[in-house]
Amino acid sequence: MNLRVMGFALLLASAPVFAEQTQSLSAQVGVIAFQSGDEEIVLVPIDASFSLTASTLGAAAWPPPKTRIDRLSITCDGFKPGQTLVLDDKAFQRSTCDVSFKKGDKPMGEEPDAEYRLDKDSSDNRFEITQAHDKVYEGVFQFDLKDANGASIKLRNGRFVIEDRQL
């Protein structure tokens, strides 16, 4: 074996191996159970902020499922990589924090069946990272949401295991 091939083999053998954590997210949204899987969850930490998005389990499949696709989005600040986090109702009153839930989201810019945004006046809004292991985070959440007409919906019993898969 020549030196170039040996060097390349040594480089490959010493490269770190990153095992991906299987991600999951679930919640009760009104009367429906929302569940998202590994391929439908994206965590994007940006400086001290984060964006967490999740779609209905199976939404990332090709061809897309014929069933309704719902989408949850949570953004806020206060994130510190590798650390736990508690965001209470006061944190979600800030303009830097938002939550949305799109029920029956449609492709190509069409309007969803229903869209709910964070009720910033609710004292029940909460997001917690209860465990942090390197780039894997586990936690719980609950929010009160409203649509444009003021109709409310409760998002309860939210649980997640997510991984920061950004480079």
Image: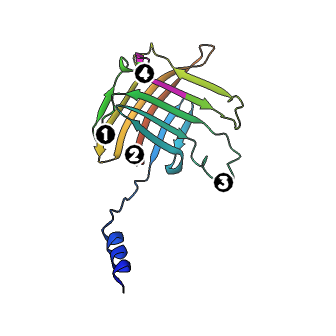
**Residue 44 as seen in the image, left or right of residue 153:** left
Q: Earlier in the sequence, mark 1 or mark 4?
A: 1
Classify 80 as above or below 144.
below
Q: Which residue is mark 1?
A: 81
For the residues labelled 1 and 4, the Cα–Cα distance comes to: 18 Å
- The residue depicted at 61 percent of the width and 46 percent of the height is 59
Element under disc 4: loop
Identify which amino acid the numbered label 4 is placed on.
Thr
Q: Which residue is mark 4?
A: 96
Whether tag 3 and tag 1 are in contact, CB under 8 A, the answer is no
Q: Which residue is mark 2?
A: 164
For the residues labelled 2 and 4, the Cα–Cα distance comes to: 20 Å
Residue 119, numbered circle: none
Residue 30 visible in the picture: no
Q: Which residue is mark 3?
A: 62
Give the x, y percent position of residue 77.
Answer: 37, 27
Q: Residues within 10 Å of mark 1 (few under 14, many from 20)?
A: many
Give the x, y percent position of residue 110.
Answer: 72, 31
Question: Foreground mark, 3 or 2?
Answer: 2
Element under disc 1: loop
Identify which amino acid the numbered label 2 is placed on.
Asp
Whether tag 3 and tag 2 are in contact, CB under 8 A, the answer is no
Identify which amino acid the numbered label 1 is placed on.
Pro
**In the image, is residue 114 part of the stretch drawn in magenta?**
no
Residue closest to the eye, 85 or 66: 85
- The residue depicted at 62 percent of the width and 31 percent of the height is 103
Whether tag 2 and tag 1 are in contact, CB under 8 A, the answer is yes
Q: Earlier in the sequence, mark 2 or mark 4?
A: 4
Q: Which residues are magenta?
A: 93-100
For the residues labelled 2 and 1, the Cα–Cα distance comes to: 9 Å
